[in-house]
Image: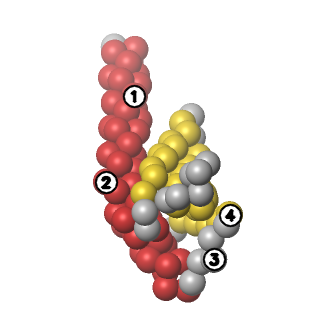
Amino acid sequence: MQNLQITSRGVDLSDTVRDYIYRKISKVQRVFDRHIEVHCEIIQRKSKIGVGKGIEIEISIALPKAYIKVEKNGDTIEQVIDEIEPLLKRQLKKYKAKISRKNKKVKLTDVMLAY
């Protein structure tokens, strides 16, 4: 199971948007089988000249011996979350592969030391 904390600045989040974010981030959880702490920060950005607004979303995951952070900008929250999901999955898969490689090296070393 995962713990998802959503923080918003300058944006009012409806329940449907919160559910959408939770649903998308929980798909990422399937890649990684451990309990992870996920922090999602949503910020409303305004341009300096007052024309054009944007949404910035930053998702951070603290893992053992690693910290994954993905940032993306866009026009709508749904669009940005859709862009972030594959990036987050890719980084978690890399981390998982790195951990499994390290575990295999340790096991080979233990076998070699036994002889």
Local SS, label 3: loop
Residue at 63% of width from left, 77% of height from top?
A: 12
Upstream in sequence: badge 1 or badge 4: 4
Q: Can you identify the residue that label 2 sits on? A: 86
Name the amino acid, label 2: Pro
Q: Which mark is in front, 2 or 1?
A: 2
Which amino acid lies under the numbered mark 3 shown in the image of this protein? Asp
Do the residues bearing badges 1 and 4 touch, measured as CB atoms within 8 Å? no
**Which quadrant of the view contains residue 113?**
top left
Mark 2 or mark 1: whose residue is earlier in sequence? 2
Task: Answer with left or right where residue 12 lies relative to residue 68.
Answer: right
Q: Which residue is mark 4?
A: 9
If you read the primary sequence from the N terminus, does the residue marked by circle 2 or circle 4 appear first? 4
**N-terminal label among 3 and 2:** 3
Q: Which residue reaches farthest bottom?
A: 15
Check disc 4 and report its element: helix, strand or loop. strand
